[in-house]
């Protein structure tokens, strides 16, 4: 069996025991039908644009940190382990550009900056809680599937 076949086997096996609820399937089918009826526009795809912005390693941790209260740069850096100053600054700029956080500069010497979630950023919290719950429930099965896949591909 080629590697593509093995990959399909493991993906199918993983999904077989974890069907989404019927309501979610119906909603996804309707969205897909609407998207399929139009010419595909990569630049205008809302899902891709949002996932590109939110799907990195640091964004979720920063949003979770800011969900509690506004934080200064150094507080965020302490709360998010292993993030470099450069990566934190870039991620904060990206979140501000997308309207998810607001940056407030205090006229102190030296100037201090505080970051907080905007209303748009707060609207992300509910879906994020669902994603985190799903990840916590499925971390073990995903690790098992990866181990099984890696063993099969190594053969």
Image: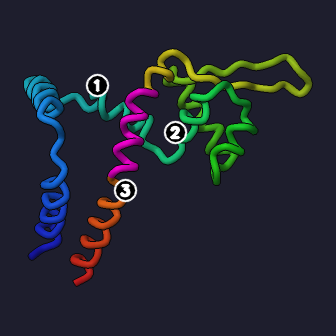
**Residue that carries the numbered disc 1 in the rendered image:** 44
Say if mark 1 contacts mark 3, CB within 8 Å. no
Of pointers 1 and 2, the one earlier in the residue sequence: 1
Residue at (80, 18) in percent of width and height: 106
Relative depth, front residue between 109 and 121:
121
- Decide: is 11 above or below 122: below
* Viewport quadrant of the N terminus: bottom left
Q: Is 56 left, or right, of 18 in this rendering? A: right
Q: Position of residue 38 (x, y in %)?
A: 12, 23
Closer to the observer: label 1 or label 3?
Answer: 3
Closer to the observer: label 1 or label 2?
Answer: 2
**SS category of the residue bearing label 2:** helix
**Residue that carries the numbered disc 2 in the rendered image:** 59
- Decide: is 78 above or below 66: below
For the residues labelled 2 and 3, the Cα–Cα distance comes to 19 Å
**Residue that carries the numbered disc 3 in the rendered image:** 139
Residue at (31, 59) in percent of width and height: 142
Magenta run includes residue 41: no
Magenta-colored span = 125-137
For the residues labelled 1 and 3, the Cα–Cα distance comes to 32 Å
């Amino acid at each position: 069996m080629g590697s593509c076949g093995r990959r399909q086997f493991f993906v199918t096996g993983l999904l077989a025991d974890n069907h989404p609820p019927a309501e979610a399937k119906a909603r996804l089918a309707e969205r897909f039908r609407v998207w399929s009826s139009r010419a595909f526009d990569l630049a205008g795809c809302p899902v891709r644009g949002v996932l590109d912005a939110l799907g990195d390693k640091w964004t979720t941790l920063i949003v979770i940190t800011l969900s509690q209260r506004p934080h200064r740069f150094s507080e965020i850096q302490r709360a998010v382990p292993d993030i470099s100053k450069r990566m934190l600054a870039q991620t904060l700029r990206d979140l501000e550009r997308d309207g998810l956080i607001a940056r407030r500069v205090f006229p102190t010497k030296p100037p201090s900056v505080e970051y907080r979630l905007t209303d748009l950023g707060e609207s992300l919290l509910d879906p994020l809680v669902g994603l985190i719950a799903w990840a916590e429930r499925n971390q073990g099965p995903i690790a098992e599937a990866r181990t099984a896949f890696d063993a099969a591909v190594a053969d």
